[in-house]
Image: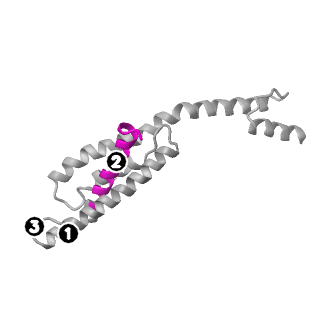
Amino acid sequence: MSENRQMLQSIENDEYTCLNDKYTLLLIDSKASFMETKMKISPKLNQYPKYLGLFLVIAGIPTMIVDDSYSAEIPLLVGLFILLVTTDKIEDERSIQIKTSSLYIAFIISYATKLIITNLHDHAFISFELTEINYFLILTLALANTIFYGRLYIIRF
């Protein structure tokens, strides 16, 4: 019983001690190879959602312009959302704070734009209005992505 407890503690503490049991060595070796595999695969798998988001944005813009159906803006909306919520290789407090504040700023700008456009439409200065919620979300997510990546990579403050 105490050997099993010692074996479990050595595995939990990542101590690779040699116990007189082939099963223990197999467990320790498999845990080490699992951790190495996890470390190697993780960064590559992290990039695929960004590529999917970029593909959906690139495919969604012409689809929204050409197609007049009700759900034509869905690929663009999903692509912008995926780009915003995917994590980077190094996700720290700074990037999370920049992402959150970028979404906050984008929401304020989008809502102010909606209020201005609605007011201009009511006074017959412009002929269109942001009545669809999807267009408001597209505007908000596009601004949030632009502000976030601009602040993260271009403007370093």
- Where residue 109 sits: x, y (%)? 30, 58
Give the quarter of the image for residue 38.
top right
Q: Nearer the viewer, residue 115 or 24?
A: 115
Amino acid identity at mark 2: Ile
First in residue order: circle 2 vs circle 3 = 3
**Mark 3: secondary structure:** loop
Measured in 3D between alpha carbons, the distance from the residue under mark 1 to the one under mark 3, in whole angstroms, is 10 Å
Q: Residues within 10 Å of mark 1 (few under 14, many from 20)?
A: some
First in residue order: circle 1 vs circle 2 = 1
Q: Residues within 10 Å of mark 2 (few under 14, many from 20)?
A: many
The image's mark for residue 125 is: 3
Instruction: Please give the residue where the numbered disc 2 appears in the rendered image.
Output: 147
Give the quarter of the image for residue 22.
top right
Magenta residue span: 136-157
Q: How many marks?
A: 3
Amino acid identity at mark 3: Phe
Above or below 97: residue 122:
below
**Mark 1: secondary structure:** helix
Measured in 3D between alpha carbons, the distance from the residue under mark 1 to the one under mark 2, in whole angstroms, is 24 Å
- Where residue 52 sits: x, y (%)? 35, 42
Q: Residue at x 33, y 61 (%)?
A: 108
